[in-house]
Amino acid sequence: MSTLHAPQYDTRNLPYKVAVLCYLFDAQDRLLMLHRRKPPNIDMYSPVGGKIEISRGESPHECAVREVHEETGLQLRDDEMRLMGMVSERAYQGEMHWLIFLFECTRPIRAEEVPVREFDEGRLEWIP
């Protein structure tokens, strides 16, 4: 990764948090969702994803591949994740603005490819 030796920057005062959400489907068109056990959105479902490490220059695409691996154990190739949209949320929960990049896996995922089912943030479930 080319950003390993890049300088780190303090991003605490930026007006936006920047994140990715990753949509992974199986052959039956079920979506892999995280049943959240931590805020925000406790006890709700969300796609896997997380914050981009912008302080070290991580790209949204790099973040999508990293977050899928961290949360599911699935190691996707770069060309298996495609940017499909972006969401901008102003003053989410009255606190912070968000820019969220939406990614979709370009191939169906088999359930047995996802070794991680439960971790500190919640439980992964296939949702019709």
Image (cartoon, rainbow, N blue to C red):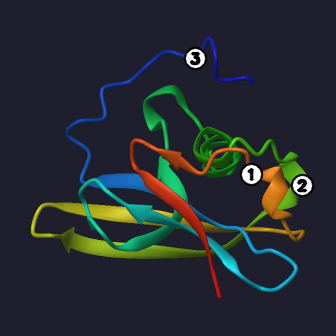
> Which badge, 1 or 2, comes first in the chain's sequence?
2
- Name the residue that disc number 3 marks: 6
- Name the residue that disc number 2 marks: 79
Q: Kindly indicate whether the residue at mark 3 contacts the one at mark 2 (C-beta within 8 angstroms).
A: no
Look at label 1 and name its amino acid.
Val
Look at label 3 and name its amino acid.
Ala
- Name the residue that disc number 1 marks: 114
Residue 27 picture quarter: bottom right
Look at label 2 and name its amino acid.
Asp
- Residue in the picture at 26% in, 64% down: 42
Return the x and y of residue 19 as percentages of the image width and height.
46, 55
Residue 97 picture quarter: bottom left
Residue extending furthest toward the top: 5
Return the x and y of residue 52 as percentages of the image width and height.
49, 44
- Residue in the picture at 78% in, 85% down: 29
Taking depth in this image into account, of 82 and 40 the one nearest to the observer is 40
Q: Kindly indicate whether the residue at mark 3 contacts the one at mark 1 (C-beta within 8 angstroms).
A: no
Residue 80, visible in the rendered structure: yes
- Residue in the picture at 17% in, 70% down: 91
Residue extending furthest toward the left: 94
From the viewer's perspective, is 6 left or right of 26?
left
| Disc 3 element | loop
| Image quarter in which the N terminus is found | top right
